[in-house]
Amino acid sequence: MSKTVCVLFLTGFGMVCYLPPLCAEEKVQVPGTAEDATGAAEVTEEKVTEEITVSARARDPLAAQRNASAVQLDGDLLRSLPARLEDPLAVASLFVDPAAIGAGGTKIVVDGVEGDTLDVPSSSVRSIAVDSNPYSAEFGRPGRGRIEVTTRRGSLVRLHRRFEFAYRDANFNAANPFDAVHPSRQRSWVEGELDGPWLGGKASFFVGGDYLRDNNNSFITALTPSGAVSEPLPFPRRTAHLIARSDIRFTPLHTLSLRYNWSDDRLSNQGVGAFDLPERAWNSRNRTQELRISDVARVGTDFRNDLYFDFRYRPKTADSVSDAPAVLVNGSFNGGGAQVSLRNVEKAIELEDLASYRLGPHSLRFGGIVKSRLIDYTDASNFGGTYTFSGLPHFVNNLPSQYTVNGGNPRVGFTQNEFAYFLQDEIRLRPRLNLLLGLRHEWQSNLDEHANLAPRLALSAASEDGRTIVRAGTGIFYQRQPVTLEEQYRLLGGSNLRQVVLTNPSYPLTGDPFAQAGPPNVLRLDSHLRAPYDIQASLGVERKLGEHTTLTAEYTLLRGQRLYRMRDINAPQPATGIRPDPNFLNVDQFETTGSSRSDSLKLGVRATIADRLHLVAQYTLSHASDDTSCPFPQPDLCSPPADSYDLAGEGGPADHDQRHRFNLAGVFDLPGDFTLGCVVSLSSGAPYNITTGFDDNQDTVFNDRPNLGNPAAPFQSFAVDGREVGGTPGVLYDGPQALFAGRLVPTTPSSVHWLIQPGPGNVGRNSGRGPAFADIDLRVAKRFVLREKSKGSQDVELRLDAFNLLNHVNYYNYVGTLTSPYFGRANDAHVPREIQLSVRVRL
């Protein structure tokens, strides 16, 4: 068998594997070292696919980026695991810590450039890492909230072709527990790639694409005046991705990379399911075009520079199927139109320059990032109006509690500029002691704050035998202000859109609502608005067992400060019921006054056993609390306080608080070219909020919370004050009897769990708790070799995937509204068992 020799030029900062013509193994002098080393690494010709660039420090087990608690998934492992949505990030996302995500969502770093989505085909993904180098000053977010993706290059040796097709049919799937009739569904996905050398072997190319055609169904579980509704509704999806990449190697130390990717995602009948009836459907289309140019150059043996230029064009649209006014009946059903009308075009340019320099025991890394985003945003949502009813009896009697409508100019445009630079020094203090010191500074144009200095520190120490490593670190991580906040402020700040609210209107409404309306709603930004930040500290230990098994244990404390919150600073005063400023109704103000705390203990194992079993597993014991539910600062996603004048009741379990989480991804190579891949995800139940369904404090928000009665009484039992149901004020009546049967049956506080009474309730946020989640996905694959590796591999692989193998019903969307007949129960569930057949051909 012919062999290829990789001559290794080991510089102070990196290692280049140059691929010369086929030759014999040889000894080489490694520049920068005091003695000769065997610099030839034997690899078969079939394995030689590209120039390989790795950090020399990355091979050092004490290096900051070599933390064993990181989850590393290479392309071969990813392709052997079941992927429900053919999403290469699906498995990696299981290992992301929700507490570390921040207001901008999980950060997706693709080939060194940070973003919020992955718009490339799954075939182009070479590797994925989570929590790698958690305290790196290069990135804005901690490693636990960051996914790093490396895409594939083309081969420098020969042409490769790969084709994959996957198919699902409802006839092979289990039934959804909320659907009385098993609906039809077909889902097909096709992917292909082509890569190889060009320009006489000085460059490589890679072209790949995929297309998804999914005719899925959503399931409606609602209660209308005509009775219970339980039916499916198709929501088709059509998604396509394309990537074209070329890497041109001018010299072994200088490479230019060009990459273009395109995606188109179209979804129909969104927004339907659970309480939302078919007429609530809306359609969307999201497209992306991206051009990326990167230049990697090395000067001498100690310096490397990475220059990136990135341009993105993202148009997005969303429109309701029906223009009818929306009808929201708390806890029962939502009808009418969805009142969705959005247009968003974003053009973003990013320039990033990173440099690495090795000087004795110091490994320096420094650089800067400049990003400019041009936004053209139109939001004509709710121009047709929305009626809100406290419950089904109020709807039957044509007694809406509220009517809201928007009008005016729905279009805004602006530019948001973001800047960041950092300096990091990784120092080998002693042979078994490593220190990382970093400082990052970032700011943005629409936030009047520039003192966002984020220091980072990480320390690692090894035992004498090198098999045990202790790691500790701490750092500050700032969150950027999302574009959505500026969009909403410019729209609802008073100069563009007018948002009016009518209390207890007629139904249907007659006349012009703007003529009948009183003062409008406005949205403001607190003059003291600052960038939220997190302080993270961790202490962990790694123990290597044998050559291919590592155990890890790590405790992490994460505290969030200055988190986003939306509060009505013009809410009716509790004592008088009068609003402070009579010129406005609600003055919803975004503030950075929230806080959070997360404590977690993470136990992990990464192992390769007998070269057949490859697995990564992680168990997390955690507790997370906060006093704000505002994952993204925009009005429809931020839940305002139940009482804007008393925020004490907002403290409680975080929305993502799950005491136990266990995730496993493993591949077992069986005899006969069979492969078994498995993904296991287990977690405790998540919390949900308990509300009354009424707006007793007249702040136009139906999120008032009850008082606690007898904690030992049945969870779904509650009593309601006579004022709410036409009885005697101050007398408690059995809630279900009064609301759903029309009978006023007096009761006592000790007989029920919850009490709906005038005034603020004493029940804290997120007092409900859903059940545990369990999911096991399995893949069985058989590989058929068409041509031996020595002649150029050609093979076919047949696969059988089973998602939710045990068909465990995972309920979600628990109803916390006391006035709902579904209170304390779920009205939706995650997908039941699904079977998928697929084939992969590699030439």
Image (spheres, rainbow, N blue to C red):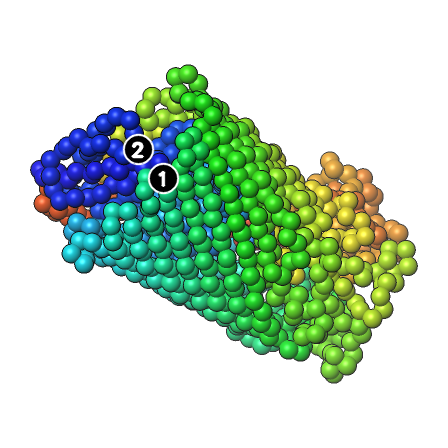
Name the residue nearer the viewer: 3 or 99.
3
Give the amino acid at mark 2: Gly
Residue where numbered disc 1 is placed: 302
Would residue 505 be visible to someone looking at this image?
yes
| Badge 2 or badge 1: first in the primary sequence | 2
- Asked where in the image residue 91 lies, by quadrant, the reply is top left
Name the residue nearer the viewer: 546 or 284.
546
User: Which residue is painted at 22% across and 55% down in the image?
Assistant: 203
User: Which residue is painted at 67% across and 44% down in the image?
Assistant: 561
Residue where numbered disc 2 is placed: 32
In the displayed structure image, the side of residue 381 where residue 421 appears, left or right = left
Would residue 108 be visible to someone looking at this image?
no
Name the residue nearer the viewer: 675 or 367.
367
Residue 311, given in percent of the width and then of the height, sits at: 43, 63
User: Which residue is painted at 67% across and 52% down in the image?
Assistant: 530
Q: Secondary structure at mark 2?
A: loop
In the displayed structure image, the side of residue 529 where residue 25 appears, left or right = left
In the displayed structure image, the side of residue 206 where residue 141 appears, left or right = right
